[in-house]
Amino acid sequence: MSTAILTGQPVPGSSIEGDLRSLGYDIRVAADPADAETLLAQVPGDQRVAVVDTRFVGHLHALRLGLTDPRFPLAAIPGAVTAQPAGRQALTRAMAREASAGGGAALAVDSLADRIVTALDDDGTDIHRPELGSLVAAVPADPQARNEARQAVAGVDDEAVRLKSAVKSRDGFFTTFCISPYSRYLARWCAHRGLTPNQVTTASLITALIAAGCAATGTRGGFIAAGLLLIFSFVLDCTDGQLARYSLQYSTLGAWLDATFDRAKEYAYYAGLALGAARGGDDVWALALGAMVLQTCRHVVDFSFNEANHDATANTSPTAALSDKLDSVGWTVWVRRMIVLPIGERWAMIAVLTAATTPRITFYALIVGCAFAATYTTAGRVLRSLTRKAVGVPPGVKHWGSTDRAAGALADLADSGPLAQGLAGALKKLPARPPFSSRAFVALPGAVLLVAGAWLEPYGSWLPVLGAVLYVLTSAAAVALPLKGALDWLVPPLLRAAEYGTVLVLAAKAEVNGALPAAFGLVSAVAYHHYDTVYRIRGNAGAPPAWLVRAIGGHEGRTLLVTVLAAVLSASQFTVALTALAVAVALVVLFESIRFWVSAGAPAVHDEGETA
């Protein structure tokens, strides 16, 4: 139970007590600031507490936004301030200072809640202030102002505002115009029946897995059912986030489920399509794995670039200026969002092609579309990085604004294991000048030669092993110095492409049944680990523990091991080894991931900008 302490002179006919009770608050009334301080001290430290002016006039949803969002230790709107246990100490200090300074007379004139907020600001305390938009939240000073505020409340439908705010402010074309217009009402329906976002997320996963099962039947009816179920799974996927925003039901577990289930659903569907094709005599496992590799590497490009620029110095570039100019023209915004093939457009395309064509055609279209999107986005980001210049730097001087935090995040995303980390210490003496100044160009030769060697040589050759040894050296050299260069955000995606691509090529070269599905399982397990790393970093929780990276070998250790296994084992034995490795990695990664995300210290990650 949460507690609200009402302060100030009571107003006849006010609905504030009823509104607060509807939001789950127990009401206590303070006679003066000193009494409010006493009441605050009586509230258990593990409960949320709010200080609210009795003269408050505003929408119920404004109170909900200000006083019930679980993501912020301290939050405030005009006339109300709230603290969760993490912000309780700061609120208590500010209350004590205002109570001793204000006295009984000041309470009748000023809003104690607003004075507390001012005191918190003076202390440099971070306070969340939700965007209210057209919603009203005010503490009128006289009857005329009160009547005007009440009229303003009556003039705005807060339920309509609540429904609109449940939808992401930035999303893809298909999601915005084909899903959200009705999924928001489904979210409201779920909220009124007590369903939680986690339950809807789980329903979305189950629906997608059933869709994958239908695709695995290999029949036309199964493919049609799979396409329809995949679209419905996406509707539920949109609904869970809208339900969380509609009812402010944010949770750490929900963040983890939402972050990981999208990839699990999509990649399970790829596997279902491949199984269905195999039932019809068409082996498309290489295409399924290729699509997963390409899509995962696309995401790593997004993650790495965003982390490199997360807290970088403000900059300008001709590319950024052109992008801003294009965004000022309405239709170009939607075209640019569609051509990057975000999740809505991608799943719609997969669903339609599954129902109407064959798995092979579906994968061909998916790979071509993702390849074009990856080329478009990566090229734009490379141009931004090369032409960026920090504000305030003299003309002609290039400056990269990456910080130690950004460099650390890129190093974590690199996923270097014991071999690369051990060699990196010896390679720190490499000159920090071209070509070594750009760590991406240090990593590139080893990655290219590794995949090329696996591609050009027959199965069982030792040349890929030599390529893997070179890859270990170049990847170690790439992370030997902080990743602060203009293109250093390319290092993690290069390493992902090299590792995943090597597994794909060697499994395809084995040319035995089961090798590519085993490789699909291994890449899935490793990719999950890399997605898990991303969301830990986004939650400011750092990378997974060092023991986990050591246990699964790091990217260079796994790559070297797979090439050695391909050289010393027969094709059938290699398939068994890949399967065992996939199971081992999956068990270790899932154990640690579940342990972390259900623990009390896990961060609540809610990324409103992720559309892919």
Image: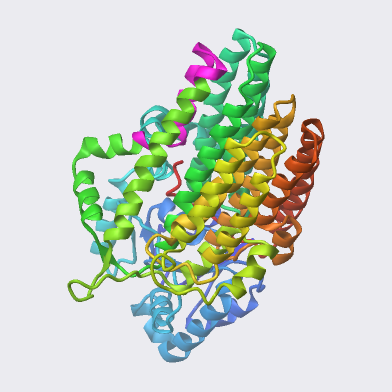
- Whether residue 169 is visible, yes or no, is no
> Which secondary structure dominates the residues rendered in magenta?
helix
Q: Is residue 339 magenta?
A: yes
Relative height, residue 455 to residue 476 (above, below): above
- Whether residue 355 is visible, yes or no, is yes
As rendered, which of 6 and 306 lies closer to the eye?
306
User: As drawn, is 500 to the left or to the right of 327?
Assistant: right
Relative height, residue 164 to residue 59 (above, below): above
As rendered, which of 45 and 334 lies closer to the eye?
334
Residue 608 at x, y percent in the picture? 44, 49
Relative height, residue 425 to residue 22 (above, below): below
Q: Is residue 226 magenta?
A: no
Give, as a single range, the part of the protein colored magenta. 338-361
Residue 428 at x, y percent in the picture? 54, 75
As rendered, which of 214 and 450 lies closer to the eye?
450
Residue 228 at x, y percent in the picture? 54, 19
Residue 113 at x, y percent in the picture? 43, 74
Q: Residue at x 61, y 74 (%)?
A: 425
User: As drawn, is 152 to the left or to the right of 255?
Assistant: left
